[in-house]
Image (spheres, helix red, strand yellow):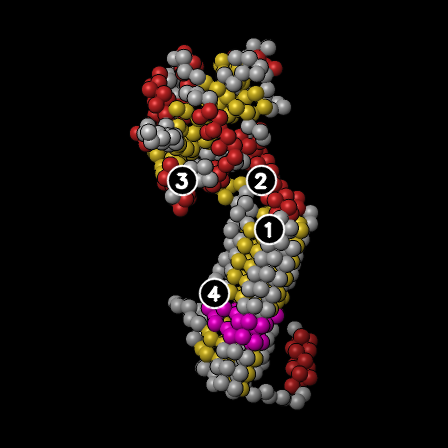
């Protein structure tokens, strides 16, 4: 006889993301407040997609729903609108149609960004192994005051007798340090068969998902609990202080992970490194550096103090001197930046190129080995290899209506204090004399000088001073 196929339970994840977050005192949706460089909800989704595919994840949204949807739409998850918002139980009532076809529903909190894929998987597997109707993820806290306590049937039992809110605790129950974390696993069929028994008989007039434990217990369905290995994983950001604490923990963990992978970070407590940043081995990060967004740094780089690098790609062996700012820029291997360089979006710096003191670039390509070392603005420009840009040079790329491109071909020498009025092309090997204003194309290997001939008037300054002295005496 053929072996029967083992049924693998279909698992969905529902993320509670509809709340306003009143205690944050903010006009912005709670789940869009950022820690570790991205929204709270984005962190939860990132963990969830490592457990189930995005098509099986449902964010239940309500307050500022359009903004929340737009912020995480790129993840490919689904959305369920809860309007009005009448509690966590009501959220799953609203999502019933989307979730009822699954075998198991995991419920996560959209404001608890420290949750890991390992803990979500642990919750799912424990729930399935116990054949439970409901599984609570719990946490054991040193100070559980204010949280609902989980009362087990015995000290070593997986089964839950009750969840008791703080104000209803007896003196004996007040000693319990295991709290209900607000993360759950449900057998979907049992959940939706009983969910309409939830009541709004409470001070806030809402449907609480926590009450399902008592409802299922009365129905003789099994309710169990499993404690998170790290209690901080399940704590949410309900106040500004809690958000900052979560952010600090997240960034400290990021620095530890990078250092374990071969990155040196001096005084990591002074650095701000976002969760999605990637850094190659043997790169050195000095104090007071910010590396943000989806920045990728190669190996053997040195990022010196007070630099800010956001959503940029930096190759191997790049030196970023103090005080540089990079925004959506690309820097190839061996380049040197700064101090105090500003690379704006669209800047592409070639291999071994130099961008130096107080140089600003925007939407340019600077070729291999080219140099712009001092006090220069280069915008909307294509610059070849081996080019020298003298101090004080600017590309005049804007005519008041449109932006235009400056093209500087290989081997060109641009003298100091030159003004290149786009659109203009400086061809291969040409020279531009210092202090020139260039409005026309320059031929290959030519010298272009665009300035008035120097005049010298002997004694002019002496006469001028005497005139000024006389005028002052007459007053």
* Local secondary structure at mark 1: strand
Q: CA distance from mark 3 to mark 2?
A: 25 Å
**Image location (x, y in percent) of residue 452:** 54, 85
User: Mark 3 or 4 closer to N-term?
Assistant: 3
CA neighbours of label 4 inside 10 A, class few (<14), some (14 to 19), many (20+): some
Judged from this view, the residue extending furthest toward the left is: 97
Q: Is 472 situated above or below 341?
A: below
| Relative image position of residue 463 (x, y in whole percent) | 66, 85
Name the residue at 47% across, 85% down.
Answer: 443
Residue indicated by mark 1: 290
For marks 4 and 1, the one nearer the N-term is: 1
Q: CA distance from mark 3 to mark 1?
A: 32 Å
The magenta segment: 362-389
Q: Which image quarter: residue 372?
A: bottom right
Q: Nearer the viewer, mark 2 or mark 1?
A: 2
Question: Marks 4/1: CA distance?
Answer: 22 Å
Q: Nearer the viewer, residue 443 or 334?
A: 334
Q: Residues within 10 Å of mark 3 (few under 14, many from 20)?
A: some
Q: Which tag is nearer the camera, tag 3 or tag 4? A: 3
Marker disc for residue 363: 4
Q: Are marks 3 and 4 in contact (CB under 8 Å)?
A: no
Q: Residue at x 46, y 40 (%)?
A: 50
Tags 3 and 1 in contact by the CB under 8 Å rule?
Answer: no
Which numbered circle lies on residue 310?
none
Say which residue label 3 marks: 53
- Name the one closer to the observer, 26 or 386: 386
Give the residue pinned by disc 2.
250
Of marks 2 and 1, which one's residue comes earlier in the chain? 2
* Distance in Å between CA atoms under marks 3 and 4: 37 Å
Using the numbered discs, state the Cα–Cα distance from disc 4 to disc 2 in whole angstroms: 33 Å
Q: Nearer the viewer, mark 4 or mark 2?
A: 2
């Amino acid at each position: 006889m053929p072996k029967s196929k083992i049924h693998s339970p279909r698992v969905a994840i529902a993320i509670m993301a509809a709340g306003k977050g009143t205690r944050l005192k903010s006009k912005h949706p709670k789940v869009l407040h950022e820690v570790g460089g991205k929204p709270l909800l984005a962190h939860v989704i990132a963990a969830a997609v490592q457990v189930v595919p995005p098509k099986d994840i449902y964010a239940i949204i309500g307050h500022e729903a359009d903004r929340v949807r737009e912020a995480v739409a790129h993840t490919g998850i689904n959305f369920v609108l809860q309007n009005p918002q009448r509690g966590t139980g009501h959220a799953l009532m609203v999502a019933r149609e989307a979730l009822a076809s699954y075998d198991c529903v995991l419920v996560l909190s959209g404001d608890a960004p420290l949750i890991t894929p390992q803990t979500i998987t642990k919750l799912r597997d424990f729930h399935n192994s116990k054949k439970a109707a409901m599984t609570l993820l719990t946490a054991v806290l040193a100070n559980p005051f204010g949280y609902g306590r989980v009362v087990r049937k015995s000290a070593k039992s997986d089964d839950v007798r009750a969840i008791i809110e703080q104000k209803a605790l007896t003196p004996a129950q007040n000693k319990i340090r295991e709290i209900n974390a607000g993360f759950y696993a449900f057998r979907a069929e049992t959940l939706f068969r009983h969910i309409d028994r939830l009541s709004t008989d409470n001070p806030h007039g809402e449907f609480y998902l926590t009450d399902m434990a008592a409802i299922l217990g009365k129905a003789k369905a099994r309710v169990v609990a499993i404690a998170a290995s790290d209690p901080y994983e399940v704590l949410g950001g309900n106040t500004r202080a809690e958000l900052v604490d979560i952010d600090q923990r997240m960034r400290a963990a990021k620095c530890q992970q990078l250092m374990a992978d071969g990155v040196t970070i001096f005084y990591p407590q002074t650095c701000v490194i976002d969760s999605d940043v990637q850094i190659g081995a043997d790169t050195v990060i000095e104090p007071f550096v910010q590396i943000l967004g989806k920045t990728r740094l190669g190996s053997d780089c040195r990022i010196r103090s007070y630099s800010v690098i956001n959503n940029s790609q930096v190759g191997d062996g790049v030196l970023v001197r103090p005080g540089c700012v990079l925004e959506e820029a690309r820097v190839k291997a061996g380049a040197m930046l700064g101090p105090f360089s500003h690379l704006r979006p669209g800047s592409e710096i070639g291999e071994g190129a130099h961008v130096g003191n107080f140089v600003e670039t925007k939407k340019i390509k600077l070729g291999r080995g080219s140099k712009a070392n001092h006090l220069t603005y280069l915008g909307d420009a294509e610059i070849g290899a081996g080019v020298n840009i003298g101090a004080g040079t600017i590309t005049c790329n804007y005519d008041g209506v449109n932006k235009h491109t400056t093209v500087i071909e290989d081997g060109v020498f641009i003298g100091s204090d030159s003004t290149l009025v786009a659109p203009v092309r400086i061809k291969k090997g040409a020279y531009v004399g210092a202090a020139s204003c260039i409005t026309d194309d320059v031929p290959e290997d030519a010298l272009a000088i665009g300035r008035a001939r120097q005049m010298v008037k002997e004694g002019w300054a002496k006469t001028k001073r005497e005139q000024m002295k006389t005028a002052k005496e007459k007053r």
